Amino acid sequence: MRRTLQAILLAGFLILLSGCAGCPDCGSIRMEHEVTRIFTSEEIVPGYQYFYYGEILSPKAILGVESDYKVVGEFWTPIDLSQDQLTSWVQEIKRRPTGIETLTNSFNGYGIRDPQGNRVGIWYSRYDWGVFKFPGDKVIQAYPPAFRPGSASFLGRSGPR
C-alpha cells in the first residue's frame, strides 16, 4: 500500500514538473552555499520581504524575496522579520534532532531564480524542491516546499510534515 501511494505521489509530482518544463513563466531554485551562510549567520538581507511556511515557532521553510516583488499564494505567511525572530528560528533549527533523520532535517539555502535566471529571492528549508511561477511583472506565485521527486528523502516521506 505504501509503495502504491509513493508511486502515485511520484507520478503526480512528475506530471507537475513536466507541466513546468518549458514553461515561460516558471522560475527555479538552486542550492547556494552563500544563501545557507546568510541564514546560518542570522543575516537579514536589506531590501527583502520575508515569509515562512509552517508554524511560526518552528517553520519548515523561510522565504526572502526582493521587496519590489508581490508574492501570491496561500501557503506562505508574511512576516516583518526581526533579528530576534530570525535568531530564534536558526537556534530552533539547530536544536532539531539528529541521527537517522539528519538528512531530511538539515536546512540548506537556495537561490530563487526568475525565468531569465536572475536571483530574485532566497529560500532556507529542509525540503529541496519548490515551484515558483512568475505570472506577471514582479509577481511570484510560490507553492509549498516538498522533497524533490525521486530523492531519498521523497521516497522515505510523502511530503511536508
Image (cartoon, rainbow, N blue to C red):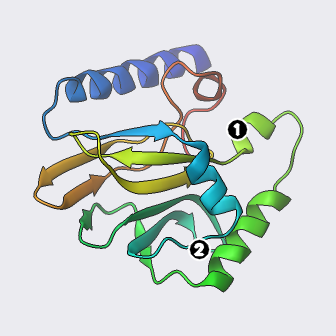
Q: Which residue is drawn at 80% across and 39% down?
A: 102
Q: Quadrant of the N terminus?
A: top right
Q: Name the residue under label 2.
A: 56
Q: Name the residue under label 1.
A: 104
Q: Residue at x 35, y 20 (%)?
A: 14
- First along the sequence among labels 1 and 2: 2
Q: Is residue 158 left or right of residue 13?
A: right
Amino acid type, label 2: Ile
To which quarter of the image does residue 154 belong? Answer: top right
> Which x, y percent locates residue 140?
24, 56
Distance, label 1 to label 2, CA atoms, is 20 Å
Please, is residue 6 above or below residue 26 in the view? above
Residue 17, visible in the rendered structure? yes
Q: In this view, does 116 lie to the left or right of 54?
A: left
- Which mark is on residue 78? none
> Which x, y percent locates residue 97?
86, 50
Q: Which residue is drawn at 41% across and 40% down?
A: 29
> Which x, y percent locates residue 100?
85, 33
Q: Nearer the viewer, residue 114 or 60?
A: 114
Residue 1, visible in the rendered structure? no
Amino acid type, label 1: Thr
Q: Is residue 46 left or right of residue 103?
A: left
Q: Which of 16 and 86 is in front in this view?
A: 86
Element at badge 2?
A: loop
To which quarter of the image does residue 153 belong? Answer: top right
Q: In this view, does 93 lie to the left or right of 98?
A: left
Q: Residues within 10 Å of mark 2 (few under 14, many from 20)?
A: few
